[in-house]
């Protein structure tokens, strides 16, 4: 029996769990663990920007303001049971049997493939300071392949004096959640679990098995788990980019990309596995906007020679560039709309609908609305931003009153598919604008073009080559 096996046997089953980072991943994970283990600590820094989460969670309320079915009920339940508490006292790590870490891992320089691991390193060092024999450490953050066995293991050893895989267990179990369905995703999605050795993998399997309802555990080594996570997001980004490029083609050829999409998606049968996603105004969020670069960096730091077509750009990086281009395309559509309406950006008002990157969510991370906002402001437009779920964004004022935001606007630009934008009435919006030919740019295909065209709007939509050059109704 190995040293770690003996330590874990003596320690017994997992009873107390810690979760570092009370965000979109950490909160639902912590309260789900709290249903199945004796006690769970939700660790959160008492910082100026995030410290408020501790009190909210301990009062049984969720700091996440988008629609998250079941989350707040579960927070109240585990608080009433006494099995969950949020704290800024990281010294309590020494009392847990397992600790998970879910901290963002953005990039400093995508061109040079340099990630910003500052927050991740700080979290790992906090664990290392209080690490004791037999504790399981799990990185849930999406990370460059090789990080768990390299960067993370080295810091934990440096801080604790303990040897990873011998004195304590270390694993990577990447989160696979989407905002708006956090609880369900954790319970129902298969869980990838990769330890740095057999004992670490086994202990991580023990941690995650109780929270799964439909999902199953898929065990592998740590680096394979890291590649799995970065690759699955890279593939999703690639699929979106394929549809975004097709939308641009359809606009150029004067056809409706949604008709084409329906036709493609109709071919079904054995061996047909294509996933046809949707085009849109841009890709946001923390994961898809940078996980391609983690995958690329993993290859780079592996030290092995990559056999690949000479002088060819990575297919995955090209997909990233296409998706990053879509806010610029929204700007171009807006500019074309202004030209058709005989107006200019300068001193015009634009009503930008949707600041969150995902419909019915308050998640604004890497929102594609922001680069568009900067472009039209630079062109001289006044911009009013509306979002029903986002009350503020730094120094930017975000309106909660859609009618007031649209009043007097020359152009209405839809960036997010919030349910509030699904039943917009052309006649009412035209009256609010006060323009004979207001402009509407649909980045999410949420309105009926014909109803707006009949009211005299200048319509532009992503992938709507069949409508983008319509005659303007008088």
Image (spheres, helix red, strand yellow):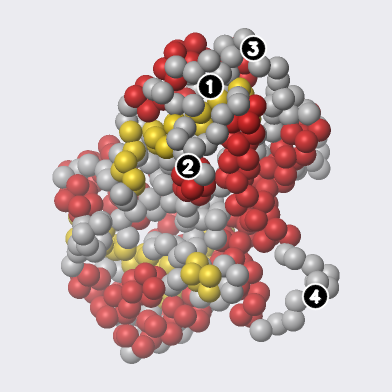
- The residue that label 2 is drawn on is 380
Q: Distance between the residues labelled 2 and 1?
A: 18 Å
The answer to whether one can see residue 130 in this image is: yes
- The residue that label 1 is drawn on is 438
Residue 327 picture quarter? top right
Crowdedness near tag 1: few (<14), some (14–19) or many (≥20) residues, C-alpha within 10 Å: many
Q: Nearer the viewer, residue 19 or 190?
A: 19
Q: In which quarter of the image is the C terminus?
A: top right
- The residue that label 4 is drawn on is 307
* Residue at 43% across, 51% down: 365
Q: How far apart are marks 4 and 2 (CA)?
A: 48 Å
Q: Which of marks 1 and 4 is in front?
A: 1
Q: Is tag 4's residue or tag 2's residue first in the polypeptide sequence?
A: 4
Q: Which of marks 2 and 1 is in front?
A: 2
- Mark 2: which secondary structure? loop
Q: Where is residue 407 drawn, in percent x and y? A: 39, 22
Marks 1/4 in contact by CB < 8 Å: the verdict is no
Q: In this view, does 73 lie to the left or right of 336?
A: left
Q: How far apart are marks 1 and 4 (CA)?
A: 53 Å
Q: Is residue 305 left or right of residue 420?
A: right
Q: Nearer the viewer, residue 404 or 184?
A: 404
Q: Is residue 344 above or below residue 307?
A: above
Q: Distance between the residues labelled 3 and 1?
A: 11 Å
Q: Is tag 3's residue or tag 4's residue first in the polypeptide sequence?
A: 4
Q: Where is residue 161 drawn, in percent x and y? A: 33, 89
- Mark 3: which secondary structure? loop
Q: Is residue 246 above or below residue 409?
A: below
- The residue that label 3 is drawn on is 473
Q: Is residue 104 above or below residue 430?
A: below
Q: Where is residue 303 drawn, in percent x and y? A: 66, 84
Q: In this view, does 14 lie to the left or right of 116?
A: left
Crowdedness near tag 4: few (<14), some (14–19) or many (≥20) residues, C-alpha within 10 Å: few
């Amino acid at each position: 029996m190995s040293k770690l096996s003996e330590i874990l046997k003596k320690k017994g089953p997992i009873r107390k769990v810690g979760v570092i980072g009370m965000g979109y991943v950490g909160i639902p994970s912590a309260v789900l663990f709290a249903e199945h283990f004796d006690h769970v600590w939700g660790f959160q820094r008492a910082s100026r920007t995030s410290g408020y989460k501790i009190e909210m969670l301990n009062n049984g309320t969720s700091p996440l303001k988008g629609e998250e079915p079941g989350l707040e009920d579960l927070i109240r339940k585990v608080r009433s049971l006494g099995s969950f508490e949020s704290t800024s006292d990281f010294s309590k790590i020494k009392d847990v049997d397992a600790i998970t870490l879910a901290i963002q891992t953005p990039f400093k320089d995508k061109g040079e493939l340099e990630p910003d691991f500052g927050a991740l390193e700080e979290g790992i060092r906090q664990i290392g300071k209080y690490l004791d024999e037999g504790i399981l450490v799990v990185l849930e953050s999406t990370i460059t392949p090789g990080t768990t066995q390299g960067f993370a293991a080295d810091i934990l050893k440096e801080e604790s004096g303990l040897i990873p895989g011998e004195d304590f267990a270390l694993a990577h179990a990447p989160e696979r959640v989407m905002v708006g369905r956090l609880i369900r995703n954790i319970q129902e999605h298969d869980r990838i679990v990769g330890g740095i050795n057999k004992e670490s993998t086994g202990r991580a399997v023990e941690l995650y098995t109780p929270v799964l309802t439909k999902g199953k555990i898929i065990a592998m080594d740590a680096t394979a788990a890291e590649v799995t996570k970065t690759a699955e997001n890279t593939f999703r980004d690639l699929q979106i980019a394929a549809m975004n490029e097709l939308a641009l083609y359809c606009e150029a050829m004067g056809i409706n990309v949604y008709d084409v999409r329906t036709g493609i998606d109709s071919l079904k049968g054995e061996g047909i596995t294509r996933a046809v996603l949707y085009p849109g105004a841009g890709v946001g969020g923390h994961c898809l906007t940078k996980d391609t670069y983690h995958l690329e960096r993993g290859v780079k730091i592996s030290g092995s020679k990559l056999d690949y077509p000479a002088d060819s750009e990575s297919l995955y990086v090209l997909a990233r560039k296409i998706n990053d281009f879509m806010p610029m395309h929204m700007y171009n559509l807006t500019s074309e709309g202004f030209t058709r309406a005989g107006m200019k950006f300068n001193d015009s008002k634009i009503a930008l609908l949707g600041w969150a990157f995902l419909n019915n969510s308050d998640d604004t991370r890497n929102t594609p609305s922001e680069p568009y906002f900067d472009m039209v402001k630079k062109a001289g437009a006044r911009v009013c931003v509306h979002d029903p779920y986002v009350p503020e964004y730094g120094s930017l004022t975000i309106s909660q009153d859609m009618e007031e935001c649209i009043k007097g606007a020359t152009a209405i630009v839809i960036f997010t598919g919030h349910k509030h934008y699904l039943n917009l009435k052309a006649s009412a919006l035209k009256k609010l604008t006060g323009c004979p030919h207001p402009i509407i740019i649909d980045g999410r295909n949420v309105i009926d073009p014909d109803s707006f065209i009949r009211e005299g709007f200048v319509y532009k939509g992503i992938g709507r080559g069949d409508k983008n050059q319509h005659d303007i109704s008088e």
